[in-house]
Image: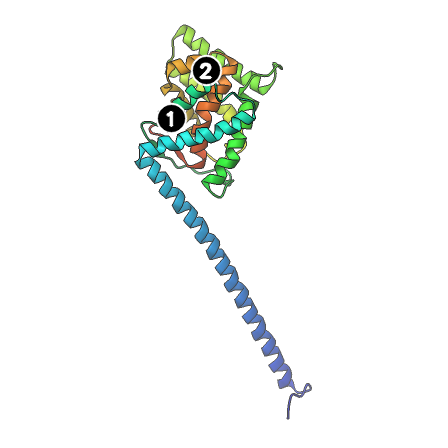
Amino acid sequence: MGWNPFKKKSWTDVGKAIEDTATDAGNAIADTATDVGNTVADGVTDAANQTSDFVTGLVNDTSKAVQHTADTCAAQATEYSKQGFDVASKEWKQGTQEACNVVSHGVEAVEWAATEAYEWLDANACYVGLNFALTTGCVMYFTPKPEPADPGTVTSTAVSATYLGYITTQGANAAMSTAVGHLIAESMWLIPGVKGNCDKKMLTNVIVNVIATCNPAVLSVSLATPAGVGIFVGSVISPIVAQLVCEKIAPKGMSGKA
């Protein structure tokens, strides 16, 4: 007899068909969303596992850790040269060598609770973004300018004066490393990409301990003048901070109490 639009059952059939179609469509959308979500989650997990494996390799093989630091220094030197630093100078090369010496006893994996969302999907993206931020920040906060009130002038002068003050009265010691390290850490924390992506106390500890283990001859050349402060931070501290943020590794024994 066919479909009679005036029969109640006919309308019921149509409603049921529409409901079934909507349910099927909803299930399909839900399944697709779940598949996409699983794919993203798997990708994040795979990236995390790869990063973890890489870090484990660095922790277990000091030669790899040293090479990784050398590679980080080289990548940063390229960026610093764009900012006008003479990365071919004797002072810069000494700083690079010192950064490698700092990790010559190995590295340790560190953990912390980030206070802000992690800005990069993986370590490679982190290095690309952070290298630029660190070089720009180093110029801003650690290199002297003609203007006395410029942040770079203020910080570099304060660091140099603090270093010289301790050397004159007491010689290089833990107190000097702590005082200078805290000054550098405070300005380093202001650089975009550093704050929120590592623990401030740990950042300070690492910087203080790096200074404490540095060759005194390197410190005397670098920290005795405001201009040298920028070279020291760029060639020694910056690569170590990049690894702390991007790989969550620190030179062995340096993430603890300063």
User: Does dot 1 land on a helix, a strand or a loop?
Assistant: helix
Q: Is residue 15 left or right of residue 112?
A: right
Residue sitting at the far front: 88
Residue matched to label 1: 100
How far apart are the alpha carbons under marks 2 and 1?
17 Å
Quarter containing the N terminus: bottom right
Locate residue 9: give its quadrant.
bottom right
- Dot 1, crowdedness within 10 Å: few (<14), some or many (≥20)? many
Q: Are marks 2 and 1 in contact (CB under 8 Å)?
A: no
User: Does dot 2 land on a helix, a strand or a loop?
Assistant: helix
Q: Is residue 251 left or right of residue 199?
A: left
Q: Residue at x 42, y 49 (%)?
A: 45
Residue 233 visible here: yes
- Dot 2, crowdedness within 10 Å: few (<14), some or many (≥20)? many
Residue sitting at the far bottom: 1
Q: Amino acid at mark 2?
A: Ser
Q: Position of residue 93 (x, y in %)?
A: 43, 21
Residue 200 visible here: no
Looking at the picture, does residue 83 appear above or below residue 24?
above
Q: Nearer the viewer, residue 85 or 9?
A: 85
Res 222 label: 2
Q: Position of residue 60 (x, y in %)?
A: 30, 36
Q: Residue at x 48, y 23 (%)?
A: 234
Looking at the picture, does residue 122 appear above or below residue 18?
above
Q: Position of residue 212 (x, y in %)?
A: 37, 19
Q: Residue at x 39, y 46 (%)?
A: 49
Looking at the picture, does residue 229 appear above or below residue 41?
above
